[in-house]
Image (cartoon, rainbow, N blue to C red):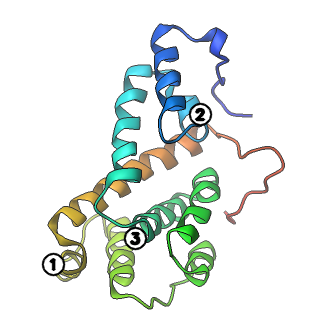
Amino acid sequence: MPRIKPLATTEMDAAQREFYDNIMAGPRDSMGGPFQAWIHSPKFADRAQKVGEYCRFNSVLEPRLSELAILITARQWTAQFEWFAHAPMALEGGLSAEIVEALCQRQIPVFAYADEAAIYSFCTELYLESRVSDATYEEAKTHLGEQGVVDLVGILGYYAMVSMTLNVFEMPLPDGVEPPLDP
C-alpha cells in the first residue's frame, strides 16, 4: 500500500480532476507511477508532468539514450516502478538487453556505441560526485551537442524527482509484479 491515498475520481476536487483528465488524455494515458502522489498537489503535479512530457517525449535525445539515462537514475535510486516501466521502453528504443541487465545488476556495461558510454560516464559521475569533470562534459557535448547535454541534465533531474516520489510514498508495482531490482 502506498503511504499516500490514491484518489478515486469521485474524491477529486476540480483541480485534481483537471490534472487527472489531462494525464488520461495525453500520451501517458495512465495515472501510474508518481501521479497518484502528485495529484495531492495538483498545481505542482501539472507543472511537473509538463516537464516530464518534454523529457520523455520531446527531448533531442533519441529513446535509446534517454532511456539509458532513465535506467541509470532508476538504478541509482532503486526505484522499482521506474525500472519496471522503463526497462521495456529502453529495449524497444534500441538499448541492448546486455546493457539493461548490467545496469540492473549494478555492473558496468560494455557499450558498443560511444554516445551510450558518454551518457553512462556523465550520469554516473554526476550521481557519484555531484558534478562532472571538464573531460566528461566535453565527451557528452561531442556526442549530444549542447542542447543534448541540457536535455540530459533535465532528464536526470526529472527522473530523480520521480524516483524520490516513488520511494517516499512507496508507490506500488502493478498487482502480481515482483520488484525487478535488488535493494
- Left or right, 154 with respect to 141, comes to right
Disc number placed over residue 36 in the picture, else none = none
* Quadrant in which the N terminus appears: top right
Q: CA distance from mark 1 to mark 2?
A: 40 Å
Q: Give the residue drawn at x 45%, y 88%.
A: 111
Residue at 64% in and 19% down:
7
Callout 2 environment at 10 Å: few (<14), some (14 to 19), or many (20+)? some
| Spatial separation of the CA atoms under disc 2 and disc 3 | 25 Å
Judged left or right of residue 137, residue 70 is right
Amino acid bearing label 1: Asp
Q: Which residue is drawn at the image coordinates 61% and 39% (left, top)?
A: 32
- Which marked residue is nearer to the observer: mark 1 or mark 3? 3
Q: Position of residue 118 (x, y in %)?
A: 32, 80
Residue position marked by numbered label 3 in the rendering: 65
Residue 31: image tag: 2
Q: Secondary structure at mark 2?
A: loop
Circle 3: residue type: Leu
Judged by depth in the image, the label closer to the viewer, 1 or 2, is 2
Left/right placement of residue 60 relative to residue 124 reads left
Image spot of residue 23 (x, y percent): 50, 31
Can you give x and y, in whole percent of width and height, for residue 120 in the image?
39, 77
Name the quadrant of the C terminus: bottom right
In the image, residue 152 above or below residue 136: above
Q: Secondary structure at mark 3?
A: helix
Image quadrant of residue 115? bottom left
